[in-house]
Amino acid sequence: MKLSEIADSLNFEVKTCQTELEREVAGGYASDLLSDVIANAREGDVWITLQIHQNIVAVAFLNNLAGIIIVGGRNPDADTLSKAEEQGVVIMVSELPTYEIVGRLYGMGVRRTS
């Protein structure tokens, strides 16, 4: 499944890298602890978090994640968005809480393989 399909289906607001929305999503990972994401998220995962600071961009870039979904209507600042554009990291935001986003993604077929 592509990021564009997820964004359209779940009405996410795409904040950065519109040109990267054709990335394939291999799975998903939900965590707000950066060290946990570094250690456990896999290449191609979409990351669900409430974090909005610049370090999320570095973590997504480091792990070659498909993109970031920020929950709860939180919005990253201009510096974070600028850094994401520079690094080619897709950031999307949603009013929904983490639990609901994860459930909807699972229902859409976004799974983690072993």
Image (tube, helix red, strand yellow):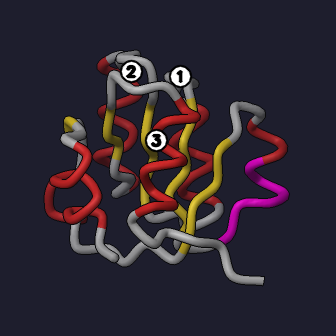
Q: Classify mark 3: residues with Cα within 10 Å, few (<14), some (14-19) or many (20+).
A: many
- The picture places residue 25, in percent across and down from the top left corner, at 43, 72
Above-or-below relation of 91 to 80: below
Q: Which residue in the protein does label 3 denote?
A: 101
Check disc 2 and report its element: helix, strand or loop: loop
- The picture places residue 3, in percent across and down from the top left corner, at 30, 63
Towards the viewer: 58 or 113: 113
Tell me if I can see residue 14 in this picture: no
Q: Horizontally, is 20 left or right of 94 in the view?
A: left
**Which residue appears at 80% of the width and 60% of the height?**
40
Query: Residue 53's mark?
Result: 1
**Which residue appears at 78% of the width and 83% of the height?**
114
Kind of residue sitting beneath label 2: Pro
- The picture places residue 75, in percent across and down from the top left corner, at 35, 18
Kind of residue sitting beneath label 3: Ile
Farthest residue, direction front: 107
Check disc 1 and report its element: helix, strand or loop: loop
The numbered mark, 2 or 1, whose residue comes first in the sequence reads 1
Q: Residues under labels 2 and 1: Cα distance?
A: 6 Å
The numbered mark, 1 or 3, whose residue comes first in the sequence reads 1
Residue 56 magenta-highlighted:
no
Q: Which residue in the protein does label 2 denote?
A: 76
Check disc 3 and report its element: helix, strand or loop: helix
Residue 84, quarter of picture = top left
Residue 36, quarter of picture = top right
Mark 2 or 3: in front is: 3
Farthest residue, direction bottom: 114
- The part of the chain drawn in magenta is 37-42
Q: Classify mark 1: residues with Cα within 10 Å, few (<14), some (14-19) or many (20+).
A: some
Q: Residues under labels 1 and 3: Cα distance?
A: 20 Å
**Which residue appears at 35% of the width and 17% of the height?**
73
